[in-house]
Image (spheres, grey):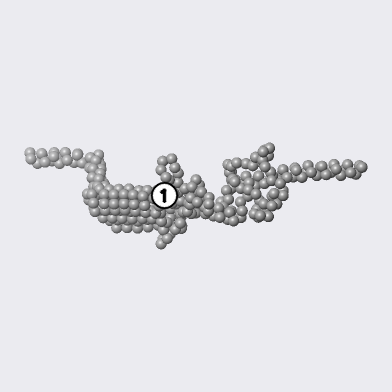
Amino acid sequence: MLKKKNTQRLISNLQFLNFKNIKRFLFCIIFITLSNLTYAQVGAVGTNVNNFNDTALGQQTIADGFANTALGYKTTSTGEYNIVSGFESKVSGLHSAAMFGRGNVSIGEGAIAIGSFLRTKGDYNITIGSGLQGHIIDNTTNYSLMIGFKSNLPTLYVGPSNGVGTTGKVGIGTLQTPNTLGAINLSDYSLYVKGGILSEEVRVRTGWADYVFNSDYKLKSLEEVETFIEKNKHLPNVPSASRVEEDGLNLGDISRIQQEKIEELTLYIIQQNKRLKLLEEKIETLLED
């Protein structure tokens, strides 16, 4: 009788171990394991987790602080709420990240480096791209963005704004965004480019010189223009060579000034034409007499 009961119990246990129950059992094991990895309750191969709520997965990875994550090979994440992934990369501070490459470093609050051989040091600045081994792209400007490849200098730089309703300055090939050039105020300028710009078309919104044709426009006599040139070595209302070398040129202004001179020349030609006609009439009268 006892043997019969044991046989029935064995059959019942075997019925429990059907495919569905085995699958549920394995799912529970996997879920518990991943949960423990997420909250750093258990170790894993290639992990070095020093505090509660940290995660380190890979080889020679270190997560030390609170809610930090280190993934990959020889990566270190310290501070709070930081994440690092890739190869030989480090992150420290608060809410920072160094991701997807080799040799990246992020230090600060909200500092992010994405790529390889980058360093982002500061608050809420971002570096994207790829520097060179031993020659990293180094972003130390708070609230800025740098993007570059195969160099230690970024190709694109976006500087910090001044708060709500403002925008930052943009540099292409340069980190310099000065507010003055000689005596010229550049604080309203937004784009700074080092090197030439090749474009199929440039459109500049500016004033124009049709005021020359107004009846109240004071057109200098040619004698006055001659005296001015002899004294100043340039045309009236045209910047001197030394001023252009120091301050540069405003494309809209110089276009208007050149148009002004063209229209003044047109008026001079009209005046000369009238005088020629008068002379021709006088000559014809003399010939008739």
The foreground one among 237 and 25 is: 237
Outermost residue, bottom direction? 134
Of 111 and 101, nearer the camera is 111
> Measuring 70% from the left and 52% from the top, which residue is drawn there?
226
Q: Secondary structure at mark 1?
A: loop
* Residue that carries the numbered disc 1 in the rendered image: 144
Is residue 275 visible to us here? Answer: yes
State the image coordinates of residue 12 (x, y, percent, origin top left).
16, 38
Q: Is residue 59 above or below residue 28?
A: below
Furthest-left residue in view? 1
Q: Is residue 136 left or right of residue 231?
A: left
Residue 6 picture quarter: top left
Question: Residue lying farthest right?
Answer: 289
The x, y position of residue 41, in whole percent, is 22, 49
Residue 166 occupies quadrant: top left
Q: Position of residue 89 (x, y in %)?
A: 35, 56
In the image, 109: left or right of 209?
left
Say which amino acid is labelled 1.
Ser
